[in-house]
Amino acid sequence: MQTENNQNLFVAEFKKYKSEADFVAFKTVSEKSRDYTVRNGKPDQFYESNDSGLLIEVMKNGHIGYGATSEFTSEGINHAFKKAMAMTTAAEKNSVFKFTEAIRPPSKGSYETLRSRKLDQLSLGEVYDFLKKTSLALKTNDKIISATSDVMLIETTQNYLSSAGAEFTQDFDIIVNSMQATARDGAETQTRSLHGGRGNCLQAGAEYFNLDKALQECEQISREVLELLTADNCPSETCDVILAPDQMLLQIHESIGHPLELDRILGDERNFAGWSFVEAADFGKLQYGSKMMNVVFDPTVAHELASYKFDEAGNPAHKKYLIKDGILQAGLGSLESQMRSNLSGVANSRSSSWNRAPIDRMANINLESGDKTLEQMIASVERGVIMFSNKSWSIDDYRRKFQFGCEYGRLIENGKLTKILKNPNYRGVTVPFWNSLSALSNTTETYGSPYCGKGEPSQVIRVGHASPYALFKNIEVFGGG
Amino acid sequence: MKKYLESFSQRLFADLKINEEVSLAVSSEESDFIRFNQSKIRQNTSVNQHDLMLTYQSNQRLYKTKFSLTLDLEVDLKFALAKIKLLREQLNNTDENPQFFAMENNGTSEVYKKNDRPDTTQLMALISDTFKDSDLAGFWTSGPIRQASINSKGQFHYFETDSFFFDYSLYNGPRAAKGFYSSAQWNEKAFLAKAHESKNTLSLLSRPQVKVSPGAYKSYLEPMALAEIMGMFSGGALSRNSYEQGYAPLKKLNEKEKLLSKQFSLIEDNTLSFDTHFNSIGEIVPDKLPLIENGELKNFLTSTATAKEYKLQSNQADPTEALRSFEVRAGTLEKSEVLNNLGKGLYLSNLHYINWSDVQAARITGMTRFACFWVEGGEIVGPIQDLRFDDTIYNLFGDNFGAFTKHQEIFTSTSTYLRRSMGGMKVPGVIINSFNFTL
């Protein structure tokens, strides 16, 4: 409930408390999220969330603690501030680290998603019409038992004020658009979707919706799910693998993004999400992957899901190489983690909303393109599998041993695409896997995930991942059953 | 909170027109979250949050809108009434919902539970002090949780409890032992006993590591490891709605093409009191609902909405059709006999990051985690390096099932995404005669 009255109260209340601790910051988040689903041409779900509240940060003797409230009134804010102070005063006696105010820079400015028509101008009727037409377009055959078209429209506003002098506002419009068909024939059931689950997500305005393009995508999804019903299982063997960008997003996320988070390396996540095989001494030395591997942290890309101007500690966001020519360069660590570890980091102090403390998160983590066309990459493979669209993922708590599965595969024999394959899966170990990277396509595609889970208390956050097609040598592949 | 909700709902419902129905599902919490690393405090966050899910129904159409409550009655009412006004204008631009059903008055009730636990500031000192000789990473959560389900037909269910848990792990370099303490009532002796037990487990991990190659091994899963696998039964596997739409890992079980061991029984048991006595739309849930009994699938979780669409009988499952409060029935294997029964194989205390690797085959993959050991001659030899498993539910609890232990453990939900969850499970340990490890 972002109103002018709320904004006035926010500023007035901040002024009241800003000198009551060594450091004080107020952050409000107001987020309207509409999630509409149409299944087989009929309404499945019309759901809307209007989440808003205040996060108060206080520093006492170098320890930062938090109080959060949805009670956006003078009394509610007073209660949250007193609680934050009492808990922080008790906690600082046994705190992990004593910070200085340098971890909260006095940044000023604003950010807005690049868009020509704001999402708040889209009515239920307009969105429903798009979803109904695309859902019906997916259902081209009686074997398709579920044809689902879904969109999440997210409008978020963050306001931040700190006693160090920070003052900024960020305004995001986000679209997560998915389309999915499930087909059944006897004992066989298969699902095909638009880039896997909710991988198709970006920052954009209402101009995103292009029905002609969406109907073409529906035709492809519907055709391919029917193909999968009669396809061979992916063979079990060791061979070359080409991963499409809508699978690479998970490969990058799980085996590069998470292990490079400095709070994991510092042990904060050991009890929940896990630790990391990466150690402090690896930065600047570890040959993470082959020489063609260049990975950046880049929250400055227009339209990518996790773009912003400042992280939630007020640190200005810049592009930075995490891995250059295959060598590990920098971690994903906020100013807090940088001070604790003496390692280089980025602007990635982020939280899921007003009710959670910011921690080290990914933002946009992108693998840079190479110099081959996809056709050249396929032509270079004697025997292999090309895999599209993630459907299964699992990795250990140190981020070494992973196993991923995709929706749709094609066998490559003597440089040519041959059979369609169902249930294509592969497994490997992070560093040897990335060192087997042997070709990258010369164009990239951009996807992301609205649901990256981490933290105690737990938080989901939005991340973007851009990638080219990537060829890996000698990978263990297998099918279903 | 109850008085606020009475005032809010009375005034909101008074504004409705004849053909309109509204229900309100309320979640409220005052939570302390304390995060530990190196047995010290990394972050403390106190959260006071209240939200309300308003379901508006009219003319065979429905729309759900959730919003944060400020507890300023006029502000919150103004927001809700504006939403309803907008829906009156817009909802008729859509079609009828096949899952629409008229709201009913499912009665009124009030339940209050209290937990006499120490103040969180005292707990912070106790935890740091108890584990000052250890490297602990962990998470303390406590405070009141309130839920309510109200509708314009006169239904008013209100539930308030106070709960806590301490979920932690202790480290010796990369080797770790897991601990968990939660109870209906705080007991410092029980807390300290748990701490002692975790430290003892950690000491076993100082033995030399044993290299175990991928392959199939007889394995014992402690209750906490089985609890991780049982989470897979909750994520759509027993949902009737998911089943009808083709997401059906238990299809072969339902069609009796496959059976599980006769020892395997999974019961949704609300008498365990892990969750509220009403679901999120206010229906009173049955005390016990057998889902899998003696190896055969007896019931899916079927919500009233799913029942309406597919012309089935509802069993008052929550609209999410997820497990809320359940038990895996105990077996007869004594805890003291586990190592003898295992003889040679893997002793697994925890599993991690489990996902379906083939939904239709009910095949799951995941990792071993924390204190896992190689056992020979009925004795622990040493800890193992983490292994990846990939195997089917039908193998684990069917063809390759060994035995359930007589003892069971309780795990209340530790999920804190968006808000603190309720729910929990009571599960035994399990011997699996052959468990397939791939990496």
Image: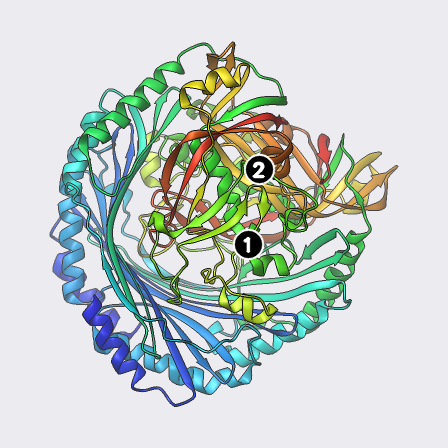
Q: Residues within 10 Å of mark 1 (few under 14, many from 20)?
A: some
Is B185 situated left or right of A391 in this image? left
Amino acid type at mark 1: Asn
Instruction: Give the image quarter of residue A272.
Output: top left
Circle 1 residue:
B299
Q: Work out which quarter of the rendered image holds the N terminus of chain A and state it.
A: bottom left
Is A256 situated left or right of A228 in this image? left
Q: Chain of mark 2?
A: B
Look at the picture and state if A268 lies above or below A249: above
Look at the picture and state if B37 lies above or below B17: above
User: Between tags 2 and 1, which lies in front?
Assistant: 2
The answer to whether residue A457 is seen in the rendering is yes
The answer to whether residue A320 is seen in the rendering is no
Circle number at residue B98: none
Specify which label sits upstream in the sequence, 2 or 1: 2
| Residue A386 image offset from top left, x and y in percent | 75, 43
Look at the picture and state if B179 lies above or below B13: above
- Residue in view at x 68 percent, y 51 percent: B255
Q: Between B328 and A262, which is closer to the camera in this rendering?
A: B328
Q: Chain of mark 1?
A: B
Circle 2 residue:
B262
Q: Between A371 and A376, which is closer to the camera in this rendering?
A: A376
| Residue B102 image offset from top left, x and y in percent | 46, 78
